[in-house]
Amino acid sequence: MPKRLSRILFAALTAFLIGGTPVSHADPATSSPSPTIDFPSPAPLVELKDGDVFVFLGDSITHQTLYTQYIEDFFLTRYPERRITFHNAGVNGDRAADALRRFDRDVAFYQPDYVSVLLGMNDASYTAWKPEVFEIYVNDMTSLLDRLKETGAGITLMHPTMFDARAVRMRGQAGEPTASRYNGALAYYGEWCREMALERGLGFTDMHAPLNRITFEQRRKDPRFTMIVDGVHPGPDGQVVMAVAMLDETFVRGRLVSQLTLTSKADRKHELLAPGVEISEFSENAEGSIRFTCLAKSLPWVLPENARLGYTLTRAGHRHSGERFAAQGLKAGEWELAIDDVSIGQWSHSQLARGIELQENEKTPQYQLSLAVAKANAERNFRHVKKLRDWWGQKKGIEIELRKAALNNPGNPAEVAAMEQDYQAWIKTKFEPGIAEADAAAQASWEELRKMAQPKPHRYELRPAPK
């Protein structure tokens, strides 16, 4: 058999075995050119500016107000001069179809500049992958993306989070063996989101891979480790992983807090290099103590204590704060650094020459202010944002009961009509005033947090450590 014919038959057989279409290997000189397909350019990373509105659209994992809160903390402390509005649009149990039902009032109403979409955990129906269930998700998500496009907002699709089957088994919950395959089904849904992001030129953030990777790594040390106790809803540590994924893949990398470097001069005196920060009152005495006042533009990203493990596992402070101090040419020995007359630690001259990181030093006034901001924002989310989301959850519950009544009582339209009338009265007298009040309180407390998060000047002193 001629070699060329053999190659064509082999290609056709291969395509048949993998379910594809046979590929022609015609001579380039006689074949017509392939059609050119214009793919959209990938969406640029989001750089939130003064006045921008960002909406987090999702299900109960967004309704938890945790990863959303940590992103808020980041922008509060790292860009305190910018007036950025965040709106949490997550509702317990939501699927893409539910997000469509509340789209006008809960998303478009806020005239967002950017919207992130985290849906799929409920859409996949907590079972092994089924094509008919997946097609419903595809149809509803496609409609949702079309609606979002009409708003003109930048869109970031997000891979659904991890389903922790081992955590389910450890709790003795029902659902096995299906539960062991659900994480794989979510991977399929997430890969569809990734492909849609490429096809439509949208942003994309993978919430699935980092949760799985860190869980696998930690289970090598502790087989019972989990960040998702109920298998579905990541706790604070898991939601830090989600927030870091957004900072890595959704947003333009944040500016550094401060990079302070004392360098020696020929006369053994020092000068301070401090790009991007204001330095004043620099002095150096005969005993070797160096003093100066520093005003940075931002604060380190600090989270509440219950999220500390997730913060550590992701190296969040090192990667997304960058508060560094270095001193070169110091006399050999131990040195002490104080900020606002409070000692924050002692280091050798060689350690200081290499540089030390301060963003996780709990003794600094910058850390303490950031922690206070994070705690206040946690309280704001619990009291106001969560209340707003709960109103939406109540609305959804009533609508479900209405649909059930219409389905179960086709012969009694009067009863259904009465329920509908009660529902409309509730919307007017309870729901609309309730969400307006919660929204206003959330925004008012956000403005107070912005004032609280403004950086302050601090007095630094580097001195020989006491004997």
Image (cartoon, helix red, strand yellow):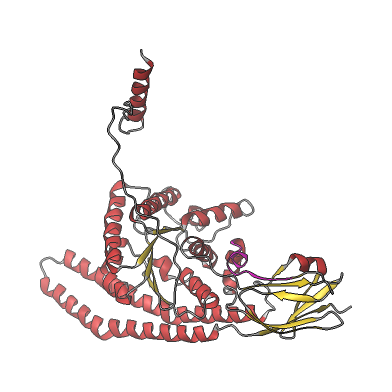
Q: Quadrant of residue 375?
A: bottom right
Membership of 205 in magenta stretch:
no
Left or right: 416 as drawn, with respect to 200 = left
Looking at the image, can residue 98 be seen?
no
x and y percentages locating residue 325 in the rendered image: 71, 72
x and y percentages locating residue 257 in the rendered image: 61, 73
Query: From this viewpoint, which residue is outermost toward the front?
Result: 266
Membership of 315 in magenta stretch:
yes
Pick whichever, 93 or 141, lies toward us: 141
Query: Could you tell me which quadrant the C terminus lies in?
Result: bottom right
Q: Is residue 134 above or below residue 116?
A: above
Q: Residue at x 54, y 53 (%)?
A: 213
Magenta stretch bounds: 314-326
Q: Quadrant of residue 456?
A: bottom right
Query: From this viewpoint, which residue is outermost toward the top?
Result: 1
Q: Residue at x 57, y 71 (%)?
A: 306
Query: Could you tell me which quadrant the N terminus lies in?
Result: top left
